[in-house]
Image: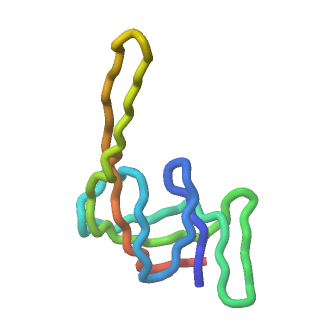
Amino acid sequence: MYAIVRSGSRQYRVEEGALVVVPDLAAEPGTTLTLGEVLLVADGETVKAGAPLLEGASVTAEVVTNGKGPKIRVFRYKNKTRSRKLTGHRSPHATLRVTKIEA
């Protein structure tokens, strides 16, 4: 059984017991969350799709860790002017373990 859920502006395919890395959520590790924006649930042969969301469906997940992604370096350079600038960032993310999918 799997489901497609929306978290933030992205969609994820999740299964029970799977780990999913999503953009930053304001939740401590060990907290249980309910992802209510379920777009599709498939169980073997049956597929239930919403338009756009599936009524009464939810996905329960537990926050495993909070962290930061890899460092992204942005280098701006303009030739012949000695102009260069190095910046970067690390996007925060949360790792979730899916515990239950309810259709």
- What is the x, y in percent for residue 100? 46, 80
Is residue 29 depicted above or below 70 in this figure? below
In the picture as drawn, the residue positioned furthest to the left comes out as 29
- At horizontal 43% and vertical 17% (from top left) the residue drawn is 78
Q: Locate residue 33, reporting x and y percent.
A: 38, 65
Taking the image as shown, residue 24 lies to the left or right of residue 14, namely left
Residue beneath the point at 32% across and 35% down: 88
Depicted 100 relative to depicted 77: above or below: below
Locate the C terminus by quadrant. bottom right
- What residue lies at 72% left-to-right and 75% top-to-bottom? 48
Q: Where is residue 61, by image quadrant? A: bottom left
Residue positioned most to the bottom:
44
Residue 73 lies left or right of residue 34; in this view the side is left
Query: In which quadrant of the rendered image does the N terminus lie?
Result: bottom right
Residue at image location 72% in from the left, 64% down from the top: 50
- The quadrant in which residue 55 appears is bottom right
Query: Front-most of 63 and 23?
Result: 23
Residue 19: give x, y in percent of width and height: 40, 73
